[in-house]
Structures are given as structure tokens and as C-alpha cells.
Image (cartoon, grey):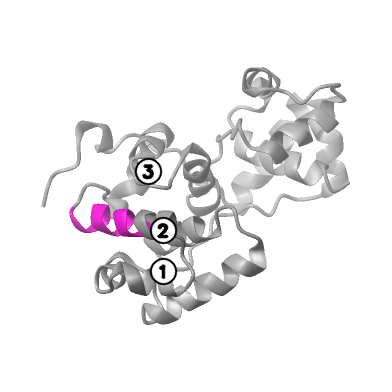
């Protein structure tokens, strides 16, 4: 099996979010940013804790299936895919079926190639998912975006919702940008550079602050 590249060697990874660390995060954010503090007070406790169901592979497969689809349509296709693969859409199960079987459940050609590429990279060692928790955020993003169909945003969502990384800022996420716009009463939607500047006080809890940006749109 090929060895991981130097970029994939273990780094010092931040501690994942826990209920205790979430309380520390919200207190720190309230102290650092009064405008964000008002949103936190209105919304209440952050519920964005990492999910531990399934494997990293099944989580990424689900992310690929759900891209650019409504929740109901994606849920139907994902359920069919799970059934086709014997209940668990992991790398080994994907390797056992051909592309026609994947397309038969409703996957597009592009998503079929993405799921296939993910499976092959896991099985041949190019993407060592079993060790990915030990990597720093940027190393994980660099590793995941090598997979066909996985871009920076999907990799950042993996960091936030699967691994519970506390300091991720998805600068291209429309909801986060709109939430920051509402929170700061900006006339224009902030671009990536301006969002980075607005988020400086949120370090090292930008994942939690981003979650509150999404919630700000619901107030």
C-alpha cells in the first residue's frame, strides 16, 4: 500500500468541540464581539457537535450525494444507494459494484465518478481516512480536495460537522456571508476578504461563530 505523502503526515490537531468546549466558545465569542453576542443571546446554545454515526467514508459519500440537490431528492437517492450497497456505502461496498449500478440508483455521471474516486483513493492508501483525525485542518482540506467532486466547501463542512473542528471559517458559504451581513448591518454582501477581517475576533472559535451566522438568518 502506498505511503501517505509528506503533506498527510500527522500534525498537531485541535481538540474537537464538546459540550464543555462549546460553553467556553460561546462565552469567548460574546466577550469578543458584541454584535455576535446579541445573536447568541437570541438563538441560544449552539448545537453543532460532531457526528459519530457511520464512518468518515460514509459521511463523505453522503456529502457527495447531497451536493446541489434538494434534501428530499438527495435523501431518496442516498437511501437507494445504501440499499444497493447492502446498507453501508463504504469503500469496499462501492468497489464491489460497477458504475451502471451506481447510476441506476440516481447518481449522475459526475457523482458516480466522485464516489468511485473516493473509494479507490481510500482502498489504495492515497486518502488514509483512518488517520485523518490526527491532521491539522489545512492538511485535511488539501487531502480531501484531491478527490473528484470534493471541493474546499465540502472539506470544510467535513471539518466542522464530522470532526468538530472549532476554528473553520467557510468564507465562500453564502449563508455565513449573509448572516455576517445581517449581523453587522452591511449594505453589501461581504466577500471572502472582508469576511476574514470581520471574523478576526472570532478566533479560535470561527466554526461556532459561523453556525451563529447561519442562525442569524432565521431570526
Q: Distance between the residues labelled 3 and 1?
A: 23 Å
Which image quadrant for residue 71?
A: bottom right
- The segment highlighted magenta reads 115-124
- The main secondary structure of the magenta stretch is helix
Residue drawn at x 47%, y 56% is 64
Please state which of residues 217 and 81 is positioned toward the viewer in this rendering.
Answer: 81
Mark 3 highlights which residue? 144
Which badge, 3 or 2, comes first in the chain's sequence? 2
Q: Distance between the residues labelled 3 and 2?
A: 20 Å
Residue at the farthest left position: 1
Q: Which of marks 3 and 1 is in front?
A: 1
Mark 2 highlights which residue? 109
126 vs 28, left or right, is: left
Q: How far apart are marks 2 and 1 (CA)?
A: 7 Å
For label 2, the SS is helix
**Residue neighbourhood size for the residue with mark 3, other residues' Cα within 10 Å, grouped as few (<14), some (14–19), many (≥20):** many
Q: In this view, does 19 lie above or below 209?
A: below
Q: How many labels does the image show?
A: 3
Q: Is residue 70 above or below residue 26?
A: below
Residue drawn at x 39%, y 75% is 88
Amino acid at each position: 500500500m502506498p505511503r501517505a505523502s509528506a503533506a498527510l503526515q500527522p500534525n498537531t490537531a485541535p481538540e474537537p468541540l464538546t459540550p464543555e468546549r462549546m460553553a467556553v466558545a460561546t462565552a469567548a465569542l460574546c466577550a469578543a464581539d458584541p454584535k455576535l453576542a446579541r445573536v447568541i443571546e437570541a438563538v441560544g446554545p449552539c448545537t453543532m457537535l460532531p457526528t459519530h454515526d457511520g464512518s468518515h467514508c460514509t459521511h463523505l459519500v453522503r456529502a457527495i450525494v447531497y451536493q446541489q440537490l434538494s434534501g428530499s431528492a438527495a435523501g431518496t437517492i442516498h437511501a437507494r444507494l445504501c440499499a444497493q450497497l447492502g446498507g453501508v456505502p463504504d469503500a469496499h461496498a462501492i468497489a464491489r459494484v460497477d458504475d451502471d449500478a451506481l447510476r441506476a440508483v440516481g447518481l449522475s455521471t459526475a457523482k458516480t465518478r466522485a464516489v468511485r474516486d473516493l473509494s479507490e483513493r481510500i482502498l489504495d492508501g492515497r486518502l488514509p481516512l483512518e488517520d485523518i483525525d490526527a491532521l491539522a485542518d489545512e492538511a485535511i482540506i488539501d487531502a480531501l480536495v484531491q478527490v473528484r467532486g470534493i471541493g474546499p466547501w465540502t472539506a470544510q463542512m467535513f471539518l466542522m460537522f464530522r470532526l468538530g473542528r472549532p476554528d473553520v471559517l467557510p468564507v465562500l458559504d453564502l449563508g455565513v456571508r449573509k448572516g455576517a451581513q445581517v449581523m453587522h448591518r452591511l449594505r453589501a454582501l461581504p466577500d471572502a476578504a472582508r469576511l476574514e477581517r470581520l471574523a478576526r475576533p472570532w478566533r479560535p472559535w470561527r466554526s461556532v461563530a459561523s453556525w451563529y451566522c447561519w442562525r442569524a438568518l432565521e431570526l
